[in-house]
Amino acid sequence: MPATEASIKKLSDQLEQRFSEFSVICDSCVEQVIMDVPVAAILEVATALRDETSFAFDQLMDLCGVDFSTYGETDWQTQGATSSGFSRGVSVDEAEKVDDERRFAVVYQLLSLNHNQRLRLRVFTSGEPPIVPSVVSIWNSADWYEREAFDLFGILFDGHPDLRRLLTDYGFIGHPFRKDFPLEGNVEVRYDEEKGRVVYQPVTIESRVLVPRVIRVDNHFGVKASEENDDA
């Protein structure tokens, strides 16, 4: 059952009051609360969110990295921008310029079964490489999620029990989800069946703009059915 506006407002007020010492910022979007937490406070805040009965966010549903370095830019020409759908571009004139201090973020999607509530935590980190404390000791499910964020974004999770690449191949160089990752020129490795060994080769990634084609004729029932409806 979707959260109501009243329940979202109530949770937001509770969070701001409980964690006022950490200067958290709460907002709401897509029927859930979004809370920005300082990186130094993430372990204390996360532990309280899990253990305190008024919150009881005992499940970490997802964790991911975000690179905001090109926020406000688009890969296609548009006359305007919308807030939803596949054309949800952000006007470069209106978007805030993202500085290096707030380039990378880690997002945590939490669920409370007791209260039937969802919460999105967001932590910005700075420096190179970006470092965030691991939450594996709080939510076990963070283990592979943090490995994925490390592999794809190069975000280090301090205290992780086994932080190593998860998705890219052996010897892969760089972090492919970073916005400045080159689409060609880096080196990747693969196993060559004919040579019977691992070989190195230049990596090439096809650039795709994920804007779907608009199909204006409904072919769901086929051409014949369409003609029969016209005749009727």
Image (cartoon, helix red, strand yellow):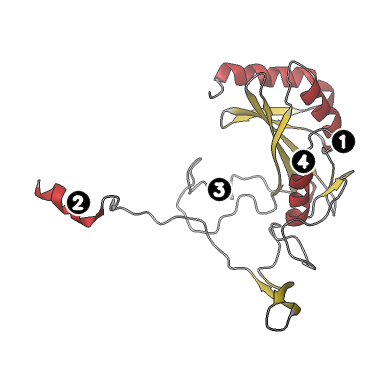
Question: What residue did someone put label 3 on?
Answer: 91
Label 3 residue SS = loop
User: Which amino acid type is marked by label 1?
Assistant: Ala
Closer mark to the observer between disc 3 and disc 2: 2
The residues tagged by marks 2 and 1 sit, at their Cα atoms, a distance apart of 63 Å
Circle 4 Cα neighbour tier, 10 Å, few/some/many (<14 / 14–19 / ≥20): many
Q: Residue at x 37, y 54 (%)?
A: 214
Residue at the right extreme of this rendering: 159
Q: Residue at x 78, y 33 (%)?
A: 37
User: Which amino acid type is marked by label 2?
Assistant: Ala
Q: Are marks 3 and 4 in contact (CB under 8 Å)?
A: no
User: Which amino acid type is marked by label 4?
Assistant: Ala
Closer mark to the observer between disc 4 and disc 1: 4
Label 1 residue SS = helix
Circle 3 Cα neighbour tier, 10 Å, few/some/many (<14 / 14–19 / ≥20): some
Q: Position of residue 215 (x, y in %)?
A: 34, 54
User: Which amino acid type is marked by label 3?
Assistant: Ser
Question: What residue did someone put label 2 on?
Answer: 225
Residue nearest the viewer, comparing 33 with 169: 169
Q: Residue at x 75, y 48 (%)?
A: 104
Q: Position of residue 36 (x, y in %)?
A: 74, 33
* Disc number placed over residue 40 in the picture, else none: 1
Q: In the rendered image of this protein, does residue 74 appear above or below residue 146? A: below
Q: Earlier in the sequence, mark 1 or mark 3?
A: 1
Q: Earlier in the sequence, mark 3 or mark 2?
A: 3
Residue nearest the viewer, comparing 192 with 229: 192
Q: Residue at x 79, y 55 (%)?
A: 154
The residues tagged by marks 4 and 1 sit, at their Cα atoms, a distance apart of 18 Å
Q: Earlier in the sequence, mark 2 or mark 1?
A: 1
Question: What residue did someone put label 4 on?
Answer: 142
Closer mark to the observer between disc 1 and disc 3: 1
